[in-house]
Amino acid sequence: MYASEREERIRSFIPGEGQKSVIVQLDTLPPMRTGRTQRKNVTSDLLSSGIDGVIVDIQGAEEFPKDPQPRKRPALLVSVAWTTSSFGGTEGRLSLHDSLPIIERALRVGASGLVGTFSVGHQRDEDEADNFGFTSKLIDGCHDLGARTLIEAFPIGERATKQTYADCVGLAARMVSEAGCSSVAIPYVSSTEGIRGLAEVIGVPTFVLDMEQKVASGQADCELADLLKAVSDADLCGIVLSPGRDLAEIRQAVAELHEGELP
Amino acid sequence: MRGGKSAKLSRIIDPSDKRAIVVAADHGMMLGPIPGAADLERTLKRVIEGKPDGILMSPGQAERHSYLFKGPSAPGLLIRGDWTNAFRDRGYTLPARSTQFCAVTSAKRAARLGADAITIYLFVGYQDKEQEKSHFERAIQFSRDCDELGIPLVIEPIPMGPRVTKTNYHELVRYSVELAVKAGADALKVPYTGDPETFSEVVAAARGTPVLMLGGYKALSEREPLEAVEEALSVGGSGVVFGRNVIQSSDPAHTLQLIRNVVHEGKTAREALAGGQRGPIMLRVDRDLCTGCMICLSACTMSRESNFDVSKARLKVAGGWPGPFTPDVCDQCGQCVLACPTGSLVMDDEVGGLRYDRETCTLCGECAKACPYGLPLMDEERVYVCDLCEGWPECADWCPTKAVSVVLRALK
């Protein structure tokens, strides 16, 4: 059956029942990921820290260090950076014709899946429609080629207030789930109960998204410890760490989510 | 229509009566996890028990729940090909500021997912004419792709946007149907225009393309959408596509059975609701379910007096906000009949309600005194008693919570 290769790929970054994954963002989508260009900082320490996946852009994937022990290498996830419209501008946005070759290139260098971002709450409804259209094309393209998708779904802007923030997260995540993504990453929503409730209605494996910057007025402030607790208590699939996290924090996440198994 | 499309469409529109009942379950993509769509797998299992002819789903859900569509008795699968924010009204978390749409999947992927048809929107009434043009072009593109793959295309033409008014609504529905047919629709999912006369013009504009009436928002009563279906079918409609009225029903299989009674078995809405049970009947009250909405009073006076003067209602609802509320209905105890000195009140043994003879009534008021609920109203002209709407009590039909319902009198 044609889905089998997708099943194989998804196993590399979505854990089995009762297990949690730690995925680290190393790409640089402005302004959500302003930390640094960590592509150059991909060290053997990071790769051997026990993480389950890394998110890099296509250039990063092609330059990714060739690991002498490929069985222990974290899954490679390639982000498609056409989402600058999420933040008000359209510069650098790629069209479908650009993203399809990226999917092919990503698979050629051994990527397990593709990563996109989708947001709701735009000042202009056109931006949400554009963003959802591109995200759907990415998901469609990945289906064509047997690749898996991880979509970071979150609200942005002033319209997502404290009162509506969780509902907006639920809307964004459910939209991409309905479009057919393989997994989603959602931001923290102020309580474990809240995030558990969302995960139950999203319908696909759900990660918590570590957001470096505040991009919506209702976005909850939280520490790494809150995120890790939410992953465990709400029984999520794992965490997607922002590029700003240092090696010690990454190791802490791995240790906690891999049930105390220090690398 | 050519072979492949025709064969696929016959999985949705029953060739024996050329009618279909489709359940729309694609709301999650437009509105997020709303009631009925939150745990979609559970809802779908309950929906399938009601044996719909087809289910409309998003591509993601279709892939995840494909196992529900296996086997000869499984419903046909319709896949939603596009998305819109148009249904995010003012009360929604993120209300739409302008109508937007985009494609979410291709005909090719829908075919791989096993689609028996693809459904897309076609809106008319945009403020921006470029947007309308672009929507029409997208519909044509889908039509070409569907033709190539032999998949039927169901177009949902809807007047939408600031240029749509009450006055031009049915004209715009008709016009949008014409456009959809021109774009290459193999079937249509169309809003009801509110009366059979204007809907017959819509059906005529479809030029033989099957017209399925869409349900829209969840109705307050079971009867309201069924009557619309009955009217739509009477002027050539080919069936229904119901979403929230089914997936948000407390018993989707029962709701589908009612719809089936009308669509495939040719019953009227009243007959469908009666489920074949004729009198003598009585009203049953569940006080815990009453929300004090008073719709029963309006339904009663509209039925019996053709107005909304609730002071003439044959039932009462006691209590004030926030409750509790106590509805009192005539339970045909017969005390008023026994008390009437002139025999003006008799029990209708066939229906179960009271029959009143104005000619012999002296307006003595003994009936009102005898009633344990103080129900019979009286003015200088007549006495108002419950005749159970001649066997089809409107109060029960319209009660949104079923606090007032109909039971066979033998069950008393």
Image (tube, coloured by chain):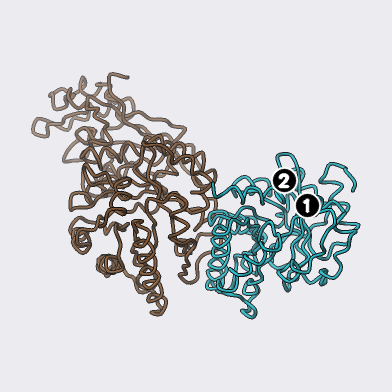
Chain colours: A cyan, B brown
Q: Quadrant of residue B408?
A: top left
Which residue is at the front of the view, B81 or B132?
Answer: B81
- Vertical comparison of B355 with B193: above or below: above
Q: Mark 1: which amino acid?
A: Asp
> What residue sits right under mark 2 in the picture?
A15
- Quadrant of the frame with the N terminus of chain B: bottom left
What crowding class fits label 2: few (fewer than 14 Cα within 10 Å), some (14-19), or many (20 or more)? some
Q: Chain of mark 2?
A: A
Which residue is at the front of the view, B365 or A194?
Answer: A194
As drawn, the label of residue A52 is: 1
Query: Does B23 sit left or right of B233 as displayed?
Result: right
From this viewpoint, which residue is outermost toward the left? Answer: B359
- Vertical comparison of B203 with A126: above or below: above
Q: Chain of mark 1?
A: A
- Quadrant of the frame with the C terminus of chain B: top left
Q: Please report the residue visible at 41 percent of the width from the left and 44 percent of the height from the top.
A: B293
What crowding class fits label 1: few (fewer than 14 Cα within 10 Å), some (14-19), or many (20 or more)? many
Q: Please report the residue visible at 57 percent of the width from the left and 54 percent of the height from the top.
A: A177
Q: Position of residue B179 (x, y in %)?
A: 29, 69
Please tell me whether mark 1 sits on a helix, a strand or a loop.
Answer: loop
Q: Please report the residue visible at 73 percent of the width from the left and 71 percent of the height from the top.
A: A59
Query: Does A210 sit left or right of A194 as displayed?
Result: right
